[in-house]
Amino acid sequence: MSLKPVLLYGATGYTGRLCQAALESLEQPYLVGGRDRAGLEALAGPHCQGVRVAPVEALGDIFEGVGCVLTAVGPFARLGLTVLDAAIAAGAHYVDTTGEQTFLRVALERHDAAQAAGVTALPACGIEYLPMFLGAALLGEGPVNTYLWLDDFHPTQGSVRSMVGMAGVGSTPMPKHVQFEREGYAIRIPGAEELFVHPESRTHLVLKAHEAWTFTALWPLAKLFSPARFADRIAAKVTDPTLAQREADGFHLVVQSEQRWLLLEGRDVYASTGHYAAAVAQRLVQGAALQTGVLSAGKALDPKAMLETLGLEVRWGQQVIEPL
């Protein structure tokens, strides 16, 4: 029996196009979906089995008959829940590329509905959280600290919309100097770990000193002025990164438990996100899910097998960056 295809929703966006390229490289049968028929038809590759046109506001039955919905449509806090609900209603598994904690909180409220529908929904399968989810599963039960270094990160318009939407959420982050083969200033951000791994987990973005202190200075202003109202206008001033810029960008992710840590690293943040999300969607349509509901990929999939699929090598150690 042939497997149901993946439907890539938001395929014409920056991250969506990279997800489509990843699905092609995986030789995964897929459909493309969104609001722009001409753009979708131009994007369809050899493994594309069709085009489905519908805006987020009127999805209708666009997800009927698909094995998994892979969505890159954001900001997720504004648009994500409609897509998740429609996927569950259609009985389709779900994967997305978000890093927005505000969306992840409401997504978790759909856990029982996903279980009742026999659906596995795996939010946050980009570079920020998928490797962390898998690494945390290898470390075992309990809280984790994660530290993400981004080398000369160049945001897209979409990532700027998401970041602006999250600005001011939670307490003002205070930079801490950290040293782990490289130094930097770690600031705690609202992350997925405390929702999906353990409530005492913490997420840190590691920046240069001037970047971290600027971040801290702007946080109270974000609480006061709610910049999310202007997210589209702010994003319009951003130029999406070129291929050369993407390939020059690397990332290093340390996941630390009480006694040990593991390190995962790679290059090209956006292409890696496309590859990770596409590979997870493929595993779901292949029947690899261990549980249903709204979960972390580390709980729903075999973490060792998934890391091997992604080509991520794990380095282990016992040095502790910061006590839990």
Image: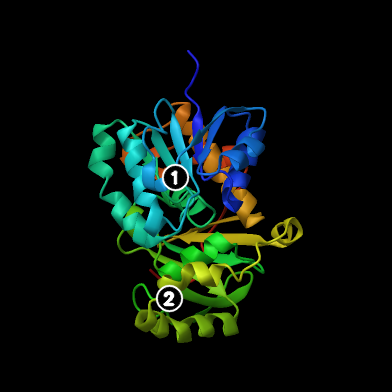
Task: Give me the residue at 34% from left, 53% from top.
Answer: 196
Q: How many marks?
A: 2
Q: Amino acid at mark 2?
A: Pro
Label 2 belongs to which residue?
Answer: 227
Count neighbours of disc 1 (C-alpha within 10 A) and say few if under 14, some if 14 to 19, many if 20 or more: some
What residue occupies the far top of the structure in this picture? Answer: 1
Residue 254, labelled with which disc? Answer: none
Residue 5, above or below 259: above
Q: In the rendered image, is residue 77 in sight?
A: yes
Question: Residue 9: horizontal and vertical position, in percent?
Answer: 49, 41
What residue occupies the far right of the structure in this picture? Answer: 244
Which element is circle 2 on? helix
Q: Between 263 and 16, which is closer to the camera in this rendering?
A: 16
Label 1 belongs to which residue?
Answer: 55
Task: Give me the residue at 29% from left, 38% from top.
Answer: 114
Q: Between 275 and 106, which is closer to the camera in this rendering?
A: 106
Question: Residue 282: horizontal and vertical position, in percent?
Answer: 52, 32
Residue 219, above or below 87: below
The answer to whether the residues at label 2 and label 1 have Cβ atoms under 8 Å apart is no
Question: Residue 307: horizontal and vertical position, in percent?
Answer: 55, 42
Task: Give me the residue at 53% from left, 84% from top.
Answer: 214
Task: Give me the residue at 36% from left, 80% from top.
Answer: 223
Question: Residue 314: horizontal and vertical position, in percent?
Answer: 58, 50
Q: Between 44 and 38, which is closer to the camera in this rendering?
A: 38
Q: Between 242 and 317, which is closer to the camera in this rendering?
A: 242
